[in-house]
Structure formats: structure tokens, C-alpha cells
Image (cartoon, rainbow, N blue to C red):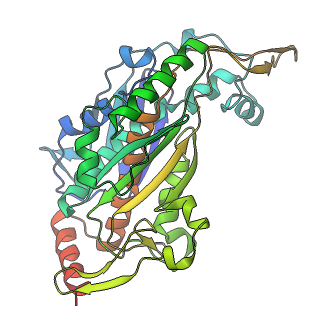
């Protein structure tokens, strides 16, 4: 099984991660890994930090001659904006952030809390996800995402193909498939910036080429959709996760909800529709995985909300530090990464093996078996 941990603070000198369980022999394209980090920094509404940092990671171990070795992979990111030891303490916690509860729980100042709770930590999660994507591509598995809602603007187009998403988001400033909707979203972000406010939004992550049978119904912690949901909800500011038709499933009868089963000699078993988003009983069906998520607005407002000074206990405005106005496009990229990691983990669980070649043999054998 895969396992990883991240360590580091937003303004500390380094951030590090260790990823274990990756089989040997997986080619690593460092340009592609760092491109994923670049994607995380893009999106209309990002703040000044993105202009200071040019995120690139180094693989410090578990990597030789451009291939994984099967041993733990060390990932190192150096922060250009290294100033944690010079930054002042904060006494006015921000509503919606980890400030207050973190300070109360750990009995320390807010600075130590916000430096770790910062979404800067997701840089390493994107790096881990980029490594996972490099494994997945050898099994024909691809991942993409797009933003479909921000404020009162929603892309109404449904059943957009995977290929269409890739094509239509390529030059988008908000990872959106609809230029007209994107213009309206940008106008909302511009107005929020003038008002000292922020926006979140909603997006969809798609996984294509995933084989049937990943995950299990046997235990709650082996259900792959549950693991994906937990991974996404763990991303800073994400407050809702759904699959397939998601909340619409609560409004329609079963005859319109469930995906009828068909069989073809070439394809094997498949579904007429994909309303459940590629999962049944916690297991993949072989159809595209469709995950929807909602990100709340960023907690740091230039026009701060009411708070309480933790020293004087007087009512004051919350603290403000440099922040984004909207990071919904970045959040969709981050969630691609955490989904990639969970799919890769399930793939290794199912097909095992110490090397990529061994995994590929086991994978092909299983595909032949389930077509019969």
C-alpha cells in the first residue's frame, strides 16, 4: 500500500514529504511533476504569493536513473518566501480558519497554527499526486477536472466528455469549460476584490480508464469512494463531496437513478448510464469516476469579519495577511492529485507487486478474467 506524510510550514525554509509503497521501475518525468505544481499556482483571483514562488520539487531518494527504486521517495520543496521567524504573532483569529481552535487545542499562538494549516501544504500533495499520475498512466488511467460554479454563475452543460473537458479548459483562467460563464465568474472575482471579499465555488474531478473492482464492499475503510471523499474533504476549505448525480439523487426515483447493466464480448460488463459516478458498493464499476466538490470562500478577508482579541478579550476585526480572492481553479487541481493518490493506492492493493512490470501482468490477467 501507498502511504505518505507531509511536513513543513507556509513560510518556513523547506517543506518535505515522504511517499512509500511505490513499486520499482516507474519512470519519473520531473518536468511533468513540476508542471502539476505550476498548474496549482494558476487561476484568476490568486494573490501575491504566487508571484514570489516558482514551485519546483526535488526527489531526494527512492529515485535512480529517472525511475523509482521501490524504496521511500523523498520530496523536497524550498520556499522562496522564507520568513517564518520574523513574522509577528497574531492575536485576532479569523472566522472560518483553524486559528482559534488550533490555538485553544494546542495551547500555543496562532502563528504556529496558521503556518501549518495553510493551503501551502497542498503543494506537496500535488507533488505526491503527480507521482501517482505517472504510475496510473501505465494502466491507461487519466484524470482531469473543471470548475462549473462560482457565486451565482453556473455552467449548465451536462454530460461533457472527458476529452472535451481537457480541450476546453486548456487556455482557461479558471479551469472552466465555458468562456461565457468564465467571463461572468471573473467579473464576480473582480468585484469581490474591490469589496475586500472572497469566493469559493464548485468543481468536478473525472477519472477515465479505471478498471472495475478497485476498492471493496467488505469493510467501511476499504470502500474506495469513501476514501476518495475523505481525501477531498481533507483539502483546506472543501466542505462538500458527491459522486455522479450527487444531490440530484435525492430528488429522483430509483428508476432514474441506477445504472442498468449490459454485456458486450469486447467490453465485458458495462453500464447504460453513469448516474452513480463510477461506484457501486464502494467499488469501481469501470465507468468514469465523477466526483463533485464544493470549496468555501477563503477565510482571510481584506475587509475582515468580527473576531475577539485573544489577549484582551476585546471585540476587534480579524487579522489580515496576504491572501487570494479566489483559488477555486487551484483547488480543482489539488483534488485531482488527492484522487490520483487514492486510485494509485487502490491499484497497488489490487494488483500488488514490487515492480511496475509485475503489476501490469496482474492487471492484464484480471482484465481478461472479468470479460468472461
Quarter occupied by residue 250: bottom right
Instruction: Give the x, y percent position of residue 7.
Output: 48, 36
Seen as rendered, the residue at the extreme left is 65
Quarter occupied by residue 46: top left
Residue located at (36% from left, 15% from top): 51
Nearer-the-camera pick, 66 or 252:
252
User: What is the quadrant of the N terminus in the image?
Assistant: bottom left
**Placement of 300 over or under 254, stated as above or below:** above
Judged left or right of residue 364, residue 187 is right
Residue located at (88% from left, 18% from top): 313
Residue located at (33% from left, 38% from top): 75
User: What is the quadrant of the C terminus in the image?
Assistant: bottom left
Judged left or right of residue 145, residue 149 is right
Instruction: Give the x, y percent position of residue 298.
Output: 58, 28
Q: Is residue 184 visible?
A: yes
Instruction: Give the x, y percent position of residue 143.
Output: 30, 52
Nearer-the-camera pick, 74 or 96:
96
Instruction: Give the x, y percent position of residue 6.
Output: 46, 40
**Placement of 207 over or under 279, stated as above or below:** above
Judged left or right of residue 292, residue 77 is left
**Placement of 4 over or under 174, stated as above or below:** below
Nearer-the-camera pick, 77 or 219:
219
Quarter occupied by residue 291: bottom left
Q: How many numbered circles are shown? A: 0
Seen as rendered, the residue at the extreme bottom is 372
Residue located at (32% from left, 26% from top): 55
Q: Is residue 281 visible?
A: no
Amino acid at each position: 500500500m501507498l502511504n505518505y506524510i507531509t511536513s513543513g510550514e507556509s513560510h518556513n525554509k523547506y517543506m518535505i514529504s515522504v511517499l512509500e509503497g511505490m513499486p520499482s521501475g516507474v519512470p519519473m518525468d520531473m518536468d511533468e511533476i513540476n508542471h502539476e505544481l505550476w498548474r496549482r499556482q494558476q487561476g484568476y483571483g490568486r494573490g501575491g504569493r504566487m508571484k514570489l514562488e516558482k514551485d519546483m520539487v526535488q526527489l531526494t531518494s527512492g529515485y535512480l536513473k529517472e525511475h523509482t527504486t521501490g524504496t521511500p521517495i523523498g520530496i523536497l520543496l524550498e520556499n522562496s518566501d522564507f520568513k517564518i521567524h520574523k513574522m509577528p504573532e497574531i492575536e485576532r483569529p479569523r472566522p472560518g480558519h483553524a486559528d482559534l481552535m488550533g490555538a485553544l487545542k494546542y495551547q500555543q499562538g496562532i502563528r504556529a497554527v496558521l503556518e501549518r494549516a495553510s493551503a501551502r501544504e497542498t503543494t506537496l500533495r500535488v507533488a505526491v499526486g503527480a507521482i501517482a499520475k505517472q504510475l496510473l498512466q501505465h494502466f491507461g488511467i487519466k484524470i482531469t477536472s473543471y470548475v462549473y460554479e462560482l457565486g451565482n454563475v453556473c455552467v449548465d452543460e451536462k454530460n461533457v466528455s472527458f476529452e472535451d473537458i481537457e480541450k476546453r479548459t486548456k487556455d482557461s483562467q479558471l479551469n472552466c469549460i465555458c468562456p461565457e460563464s468564465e467571463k461572468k465568474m471573473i467579473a464576480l472575482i473582480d468585484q469581490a476584490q474591490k469589496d475586500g471579499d472572497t469566493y469559493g465555488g464548485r468543481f468536478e474531478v473525472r477519472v477515465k480508464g479505471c478498471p472495475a473492482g478497485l476498492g471493496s464492499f467488505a469493510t467501511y475503510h476499504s470502500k474506495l469512494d469513501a476514501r476518495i471523499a475523505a481525501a477531498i474533504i481533507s483539502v483546506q476549505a472543501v466542505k462538500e463531496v458527491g459522486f455522479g448525480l450527487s444531490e440530484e439523487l435525492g430528488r429522483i426515483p430509483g428508476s432514474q437513478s441506477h445504472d442498468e447493466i449490459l454485456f458486450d464480448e469486447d467490453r465485458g460488463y458495462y453500464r447504460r448510464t453513469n448516474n452513480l459516478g463510477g461506484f457501486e458498493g464502494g467499488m469501481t464499476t469501470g465507468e468514469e469516476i465523477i466526483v463533485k466538490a464544493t470549496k468555501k470562500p477563503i477565510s482571510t478577508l481584506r475587509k475582515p469579519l468580527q473576531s475577539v482579541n485573544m489577549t484582551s478579550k476585546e471585540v476587534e476585526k480579524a487579522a489580515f495577511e496576504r491572501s487570494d480572492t479566489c483559488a477555486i481553479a487551484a483547488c480543482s487541481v489539488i483534488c485531482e492529485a488527492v484522487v490520483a493518490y487514492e486510485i494509485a493506492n487502490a491499484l497497488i492493493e489490487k494488483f500488488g507487486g514490487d515492480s511496475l512490470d509485475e503489476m501490469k501482468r496482474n492487471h492484464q490477467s484480471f482484465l481478461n478474467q472479468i470479460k468472461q
